[in-house]
Image (cartoon, rainbow, N blue to C red):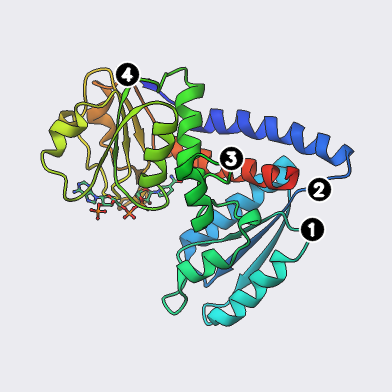
Amino acid sequence: MSRIIDGKAIAAQIKEELKEEVALLGKDGVTVGLAVILVGDDAASSIYVNNKKKACEYVGIRSVSYELSKDTSQEELLALIDRLNHDDTVNGILVQLPLPAHIDEETVITAISSDKDVDGFHTESAGRLLVGKKGFLPCTPAGIIQLIRRSGFTIEGKECVVIGRSNIVGKPMAVLLLRENGTVTVAHSKTENLKEVASRADILVVAVGKPKFITADYVKEGAVVIDVGIHRLEGKKLCGDVDFDDVQEKAAAITPVPGGVGPMTIAMLMANCVEAAKR
Ligand code: NAP
């Protein structure tokens, strides 16, 4: 039976640390402000935005939200971002994705000042990460590094396999594991012999976006398994990309869904906002 990596508890610990830091910054007259932009009325996005606002409130970050109609034009959105880029009370700008089809995500993300890119999705942030310069890290992979470290596992020298190569999870995850001196393999939909590749991993990070895709036969005995996926099954129960019940027997440690990677993503967003204010 494997150990459950409690993302909720680790995220709570990080938020406590940030709360203290925000209070100290406040004493020096520095406030932390986040602007959150939501376009449209996607139910899941509204929940994510609300959770982010609640976390801000807890940590002591001033959050301002802009809830725009689904018909908002790209020009209107870009004008708002431009205004926020020049607003000194706003340290971080977050545009909740996905955006409606008539708006180009790439154009919007790159319109955010790279100094306020607390999601870490800007091409400048991605470039900085790749060449090892200081910059904002994308929240989900940065949270996973914290989960692994704070659970007492070593990355250095370990075989790390990341399944998935998206710009927001898989690719930055691979670079961060490499930065921690892991030996990294990135697998994707064209990877041959995925079971064999995944079974080499001491640390297996799964971000395929397919419910319960990874079963015990993809996992090495004693591996640390990090499940990034999140899916709502019929009956509203949540599950990840990993078949938790099947893998639990074999892994040394595993993240649950919910309560694993998800809470860490928000905690790291808070960390990026504090970092932005300090800069
Ligand atoms: P994505 O953009 O859909 O990427 C999925 C990746 O999985 C792609 O690189 C794809 O390969 C690969 N893939 C698909 N089928 C595969 C297969 N049969 N074998 C091997 N690889 C396969 O997804 P994402 O944005 O990275 O997100 C992944 C999951 O994490 C989703 O469930 C998402 O909801 C969740 N997520 C959670 C959080 C959180 O905070 N917990 C944050 C972000 C995402 P190709 O590139 O070859 O197509």
Identify the mark at residue 274; answer none if there is no mark. none
Residue drawn at point x = 65 percent, y = 54 percent: 115
Can you tell me whether the CB of the residue at mark 2 lies under 8 Å from the nearest atom of ligand 1?
A: no
Residue that label 3 marks: 267
The reply, left or right, for residue 252 in relation to residue 71 is left
Q: Residues within 10 Å of mark 4 (few under 14, many from 20)?
A: some
Residue that label 1 marks: 89
Q: Earlier in the sequence, mark 4 or mark 2?
A: 2
What type is the residue that disc 4 sits on? Ala
At mark 4, the secondary structure is: loop
Give the Cα separation between the discs numbered 2 and 1: 8 Å
| Label 1–label 4 contact, CB within 8 A | no
Quick check: 44 above or below 220?
below
What type is the residue that disc 3 sits on? Ala
Q: Earlier in the sequence, mark 2 or mark 1?
A: 2
Q: Earlier in the sequence, mark 1 or mark 4?
A: 1
What type is the residue that disc 2 sits on? Thr
At mark 3, the secondary structure is: helix
Residue that label 2 marks: 31
Quick check: 205 above or below 150?
below
At mark 2, the secondary structure is: loop
Where residue 218 sits in the image (x, y, percent)? Answer: 18, 32
| Label 2–label 1 contact, CB within 8 A | yes
Foreground residue among 86 and 65: 86
Quick check: 252 above or below 72?
above
Give the Cα separation between the discs numbered 2 and 3: 18 Å
Q: Earlier in the sequence, mark 1 or mark 3?
A: 1
Foreground residue among 26 and 175: 175
Q: Residues within 10 Å of mark 3 (few under 14, many from 20)?
A: many
Identify the mark at residue 252; answer none if there is no mark. 4
**Quarter the C terminus occupies:** top right
